[in-house]
Amino acid sequence: MSVLIQGGRIITASEDYVADVYIEDETVSLIGTSLDVDADRVIDASGKYVLPGCIDPHTHLDMPFGGTITADDFQSGQTSAAFGGTTCHIDFAIQSKGQSFTAGLEEWHAKADGKAMIDYGFHIIVSDLKEGGTLEELATLPDLGVTSYKMLMAYKGVFLVDDETLFRVMELATQTGALAMIHGENGEVIDVLVKRAVAEGNLDPSWHAKTRPAELEGEATNRAIQIAHLAGCPLYVVHVTCKESVGAIARARELGWPVWGETCTQYFFVDDTYLDRPNFEGAKAVFSPPVRDKSNQPILWNAVRSDVLSAISTDHCSFNFDGQKMLGKDDFSKIPNGAPGLEDRLLMIHHFGVNEGRISLNRMVELLSTNAAKLFGLYPRKGTIAPGSDADIVVFDPEKEHTISAATHHSSVDYNLYEGTTVVGAPEVVLLRGHVLVEDGELVASPGIGQFVKRARFGEELKPAKAT
Ligand code: URP
Ligand code: ZN
């Protein structure tokens, strides 16, 4: 199967030019002007952007959490990703307490098998080194293509790991060529604040943010950075929300330490006043770290523009308002933490980032695709448009108007944080390895088209598919 994408404006992290892209056998084979080739399918991209498929390095599909299970499984979550121009994501496989790492990983493979609509990889969440998994076993995961170890410093009694585990896993990452990742919030202090709030009868959703103050994100982020420095390992800080943790990452990067940070779409647009919405609506914005004071939003834009933060993910972790968020109606601490957003990232960041002059188109591609590919062992197979790379491509109409709504999005979840927001610019055709997934608002691919990608170790390139 061959495809010719004609006359579009190709935008990568470093280039911006008009050309044709010829795709053969799932990869980009030729790029040039007025290509004289026969193709099974020709897509006219004149007046359109031709972007590398977006990569979301932080999602939670089919995940049990907070006494329930996410509304999106791999099929619905990845379908919604495809409509939003995301053609690859890295989900979190969980090692539950007492479980081996490989058993956790196999569980997540089974969740995706046969359902995948886009390509995907897995990080492993390390919950416990004492009963189930061992460091020796964790050391084998990079050979299976799982080249990032995530540790959560929050959620006491569920995922929280102590500093000993943090340090030991970071030392292991140094040896195995994995990238250490942390969720930076001080879960011990949060636990005290949550129990106190509940005991004092402070139970509405606003207390979710009040019991997880920015100081505790700054402290945990800085602690992890210092421990990683001692362990000699590269560190990626997920979902950064506030000036306290942006500052810690900026200081480390100024010193030349191998530290990177991501933020998520929602932190640019949703602030802590959302939690006060009547009729328990605030629960829709209960996720961790919490939404912050609005003054943090320009700090985040500045951080992504100036490369203090290197990626924008979604942390897509969807729970229905009805029946799931409602579990915490009488007690904020029982609201399942998480929000949807896989479909909306490119729309929102293009409109409010590029159209409103906060970031360039090249920087948008870097933040939504290329940097994640480079940091997580997918580049140059993914994250760019170049001969040999997978033909994961978004033909994007920069003039198309689109109004975001739960009534029209493709996730299974029953609300959208950006409900009613009208953006200018939207995907028109989305291709995964040359196969059209979405065209003119219709899904044209079937479950099973997505493939697991064995990622390269940190700092190593993932060879083009034809070369492997
Ligand atoms: O609230 C969130 N973010 N839920 C998903 C798990 C996590 O903390 O990333
Ligand atoms: Zn997450």
Image: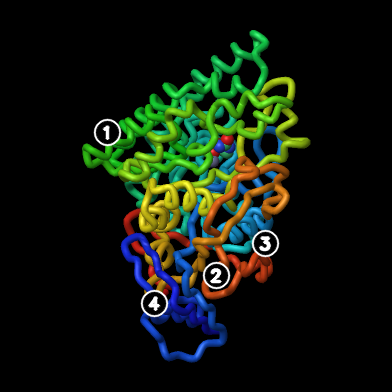
Is label 2 in a helix, a strand or a loop? strand
The kind of residue tagged 4 is: Ala
Say which residue label 2 marks: 431
Kindly identify the residue that appears in the image at 55 percent across and 62 percent down.
427
Task: Identify the disc placed on residue 19.
Answer: 4
The kind of residue tagged 3 is: Lys
Say which residue label 3 marks: 115
Kindly identify the residue that appears in the image at 47 percent across and 58 percent down.
145
Kindly identify the residue that appears in the image at 45 percent across and 81 percent down.
22
Q: Marks 2 and 1, Cα distance to the nearest angstrom?
A: 39 Å
Is label 1 in a helix, a strand or a loop? helix
Relative vertical location of residue 369 with respect to residue 286 in this rendering, above or below = below
Residue 81 on image: x %, y %: 59, 56
Q: Nearer the viewer, residue 129 or 379?
A: 379
Q: Marks 4 and 3, Cα distance to the nearest angstrom?
A: 34 Å
Question: Which-is-in-front pick, marks 1 and 3?
Answer: 1
How did the renderer colour the structure?
rainbow
Q: Marks 4 and 2, Cα distance to the nearest angstrom?
A: 17 Å
Question: Which-is-in-front pick, marks 2 and 1?
Answer: 2
Task: Identify the disc placed on residue 144.
Answer: none
The kind of residue tagged 2 is: Leu
| Crowd band around label 3 with a 10 angstrom C-alpha radius: few (<14), some (14–19), many (20+) | many
